[in-house]
Image (cartoon, rainbow, N blue to C red):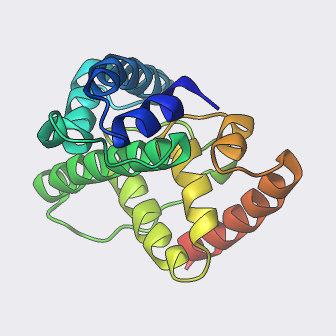
Amino acid sequence: MSKVTQLIESAQQGNQAAVHELLPLVYAELRNLAAIRLSTDGSVKSLQPTALVHEVYLRLLGTHQQESPLFSNQRHFFTAAAESMRRILVDRARAKQAQKRGGDAIRIELNLNKLTALDEDRPEELLALDEALVKLQEHDALAVELVKLRFFGGLTHQQAAESLGMTRRQADRVWALARTWLFRQLQD
């Protein structure tokens, strides 16, 4: 059991010291995820890891500092953090696209083998991926979680698999199906 999960469980049993110990640990992990997410070539240029982690931190924990954490375990935390990063980056891309392109739809090709680079000058890629993920959610929620953890959370394939409680082989199958499904959606 990870230290994060232990602290979450302890905090949910009313241990306020665990809450205070959890916050810096969670913040450090969020900072690492944000740094990984934003460190790739062509990444979002105007958003620094610290700014992203502050936004994620406020969304996840900011209003609940004196209450028990809302996460049941480490998997739940990473999933919520990845979803929060996704929403922040998608919101920024939407604002930039509306400002720059007037919201015109543009057909794009997104390399699903390299789900790592976010290019601030091409928000349509991120928006197209987000739209495809919303559709995929209706068919395969686990695949969406895996994509979010890898793409938005910055986790490696192995880390994402472990976070979801999957074997590497199971994650490989889910990832292959997700990539194929997303590729087809983005080509239409």
Q: Nearer the viewer, residue 98 or 47?
A: 47
User: Residue 127's x, y, as percent?
Assistant: 36, 60
User: Residue 34's x, y, as percent?
Assistant: 40, 27
Query: What residue occupies the far right of the structure in this picture?
Result: 169
Q: Residue at x 21, y 24 (%)?
A: 51
Is residue 54 rendered to the left or right of residue 138? left
Q: Residue at x 84, y 46 (%)?
A: 168
Question: Is the N terminus in the top left, top right, bottom left or bottom right quadrant?
Answer: top right
- Hey, which quadrant is residue 57 in on the image? top left
Q: Nearer the viewer, residue 164 or 86?
A: 164
Is residue 72 rendered to the left or right of residue 156? left
Residue 42 visible (yes or no): no
Q: Nearer the viewer, residue 54 or 184?
A: 54
Q: Residue at x 39, y 38 (%)?
A: 119
User: Residue 28's x, y, as percent?
Assistant: 39, 17
User: Residue 116's x, y, as percent?
Assistant: 55, 37
Question: Is the C terminus in the top left, top right, bottom left or bottom right quadrant?
Answer: bottom right
Q: Residue at x 44, y 43 (%)?
A: 77
Q: Against 83, is 152 above or below?
A: above
Residue 68 visible (yes or no): yes
Q: Against 15, is 157 above or below?
A: below
Q: Report the number of discs.
A: 0
- Hey, which quadrant is residue 159 in on the image? top right
Q: Against 160, is 156 above or below?
A: above
Is residue 56 rendered to the left or right of residue 33? left
